[in-house]
Amino acid sequence: MKSIRTKLKLNNKQKTLMAQHAGYSRWCYNWGLSLWNAAYTDGYKPNTRKLREVFTNHTKPLYPWMKNLSSKVYQYAFISLGEAFKRFFQGLGKRPRFKKKGKSDSFTIDNCGKPIELNGWNHKIPFIGMVKTYEPIEATTQKITISRQAGDWYLSLSYDKRATPTPKTIDVVGVDLGVKTLATLSTGQVFPSIKPYRTAQDKLAKLQRQLSRKVKHSNNWHKAVIKLARQHRRVANIRRDALHKLTTYLAKNHSVVAIEDLNVSGMLANHKLAKSIADQGFYEFRRQLEYKTRWYGSKLVVVDRFFPSSQTCSYCGHVQDMPLNNRTYDCPDCGISIDRDLNASINLRDAVGLTVDACGRSAADSSGGSRK
């Protein structure tokens, strides 16, 4: 399955219709959650089907405005609620909470079992009508989710797509993620760190101060909220764009990609580096690599987190302590001097278990190492 999320080009009437459907979905979700909690307290075992029956036969007739909106909205709202409770009982998430207006507004609709065809720039959405997108889409899907972020509406969908393996230029590559540089490859290639949050930190602080001076829930307050949300969205988009370009390059051009199983939550406990680590998006990097390697016919190997990639000499195997402030690995046994991140990426490459020929070794040495 491949997913698409793109921005919609809407007029004011369409924006109002989207907001009404999102409010309808939120109302049904909160109604179902309230009834679910009450039933569970009384000793009953509620489920999605029972909620839908009670709502359709007893609650919906009391609200005539619901007839003007798509009936698929409340059905998917109850399905979402049932999945949330399922994750909660499995220990995979927190207990479902009531939704608030303006926070994660979204709704899902389908075409009554028929496929939805999206072709070009203009698309016919069930019940919604014709909508425009800022980029062409060619896909066939069963359902569509429309959500709001920073005052703009987005269309999301999933569709089937066959994997398209690409020709590989390198058999195996080790990737070492860092703070100063986003990624260092065993080939010597370095991807610089973007650090979008640090770059926009002053502007975010200014927008926060402007928001704090507004009267809460006033018109100017709502405008300031949207300005701040759009700046946060820009930061996230810059980070996501850099990660997509890196992961796509790795999956398309390398047969095997070796990365380290980083303990990101443990790394974030270091408050001196937490902001920089969070700004890099290590978890998102691994998540993207996992599905892109399947798309392009490559393989992802995750090396054990206790493997001493930074402390081991990539030339002779000597192991020594390497504090974070030491950016060069100087081996006392063989005399090699090599960049710390490049040394770690070569060790990750060799940990895959594939034999590297002499040409590959000399290329790695020439890219960042020098014999004393």
Image (spheres, grey):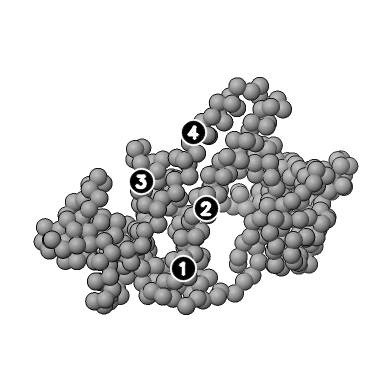
- Residue on which disc 3 sits: 267
- The residue depicted at 70 percent of the width and 25 percent of the height is 218
Q: Which mark is residue 251?
A: 1
Is residue 329 or residue 351 the one in the foreground? 329
Q: Earlier in the sequence, mark 3 or mark 1?
A: 1
Element on which disc 4 rests? helix
Element on which disc 1 rests? helix
Element on which disc 2 rests? helix
Q: Tell me: residue 290, above or below residue 51.
A: below
Specify whether 40 is left or right of 169: right
Q: Which mark is residue 131?
A: none
Specify whether 358 is left or right of 206: left
Q: Nearer the viewer, mark 2 or mark 3?
A: 2
- Dividing the picture into quadrants, the one containing residue 344 is bottom left
Q: Nearer the viewer, mark 3 or mark 1?
A: 1
**Mark 3 surroundings: few (<14), some (14-19) or many (≥20) residues within 10 A:** few
